[in-house]
Image (spheres, rainbow, N blue to C red):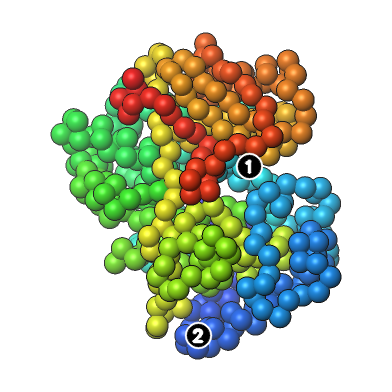
Amino acid sequence: MITVERLLRLKNYPLDEALAEIKGIQALSKDEYHHWQERKKWELVKFHFQNNPLYRKLIGNFLPNSWNELPIVRKKDFQTNPEILLSKGLKNSELHFGSTSGSSGIPMVFARDKFSHSITWALILDRYKRVGISSSDLQARFYGIPLQKPAYYKERIKDFLMNRYRFVIFDISDYSLDRFIDKFRKTPFRYLYGYTNSQLTFARHLQTKGLTLKEICPSVSCSIVTSEQCTEEDQAFLEKVFQVPIYNEYGASEVAFLAMSDQMGIKRLSNETLFSEVIDENDHPVKDGQTGRLIFTNLFNMAMPFIRYEVGDFGAIEKDPLMVQDKLINLQGRLNDKVFLPSGKVAAGFSLYYVSKHLMGTLGYIHEYQVQQLSLSKFLFYIVMDRELDDFSKKIIQEAFDTYLEKGLEVEIRKVDFIDREKSGKLKHFISHLRQDGK
């Protein structure tokens, strides 16, 4: 087994320096913190203005004097020539690269410097420690997995080394869920981690059998739900069936670890690494506690300018007069529908993320996508991409559905210039036109 801490140190990530930085920030008084944050965010803006061609293009020739005059940065702004995305002065060996899930319908590649990546992990470790979890604890992971080799084996090896067992959510039919139960009976898991909708499906299955998770796996102490919206009703239901506390994690992989609920159920923002704002439809700040569009600034990322970056969710922020970490309230994120298939298989809507990842690796850059399920066997696939929708592209898309859902599905593919948003302005990556019972 290898912990996150050890892995980062082996890869020469400055984790110890990051841990010390987190402690130093947390030791500040509220006034001291505000002074530190103000200085830090303007240092970041000036650095990227001087060293990042993309950010300089977004701002113009001169830096504004007011923070609110800085541009709102969106995912589409980063879908451009890779040569202008990265700020000057950093070598590739000093960078950490990743890609988003595409759950919003807009997949993208991002980078952060190694210290920025380290301090994000330092904060995650801090928050987990506060709810009684360490990186060495055995994790039951409700997640997807790439099915192409060698990526599949790479993820399996990582799971083994990092002391976690992956419950793959591509098939959440009754038969598969029964196998989940058997695994929990035999394995001393410490906590669950993964997609909200998949954990809810498992909880409903336990309930139909008159079981609780704590009954079949006494070692479990809590669960962390992530990636999808978890309502108060959902959380209450999970706590009732699992018989353990449920902690709600909120993040955007390209920006950072954004927030996590504490033992009192308060969702605390990651103020140690972020500057968080709420704005209205005209890009103006709203009053404390009012709901609007959430935008975040990663205060440590020197590789890419995630400054006043819009994540696509709505919520409100309530200032805490004493603690560094303010409260995130009324978060309005996305909860993915389930995919019902002709064979009787049921998959999480998040399975479509792996379809998009497969297409990005094969067809090149996809700007946006949306999948609509019209019937058990028929799907409508909207795609915005640079290349032509030729027979090869159609073949690759069909193969992705065959691999991650099941063979024999009818997929109507439409290349479009723009995909309609919801009334809220969000782009939903999967829409089911079936009833919740799959009919």
Q: Residue at x 54, y 60 (%)?
A: 281
Q: Quadrant of residue 339?
A: top left
Q: Residue at x 68, y 65 (%)?
A: 71
Image depth: mark 1 or mark 2 in front: 1
Across and down, in percent, residue 19 comes to 55, 71
Q: Quadrant of residue 308?
A: bottom right
Q: Quadrant of residue 194?
A: top left
Q: Is mark 1 in CB contact (under 8 Å) with mark 2?
A: no
Amino acid at circle 2: Leu
Amino acid at circle 1: Pro
| In this view, 399 is above or below 429 | above
Residue 137 seen from this side: no
How many dots with numbers?
2
- In depth, the one of 358 and 436 nearer the eye is 436
Give the secondary structure at mark 1: loop
| In this view, 352 is above or below 108 | above
Q: Is residue 228 found left or right of 300 in the rendered image?
A: left
Labelled disc at residue 239: none
Residue 398 seen from this side: yes
User: In which quadrant is the C terminus drawn?
Assistant: top left
- In depth, the one of 214 and 47 nearer the eye is 47
Across and down, in percent, residue 174 comes to 30, 24
Q: Is residue 85 found left or right of 375 in the rendered image?
A: right
Pointer 2: what residue? Answer: 28
Pointer 1: what residue? Answer: 107
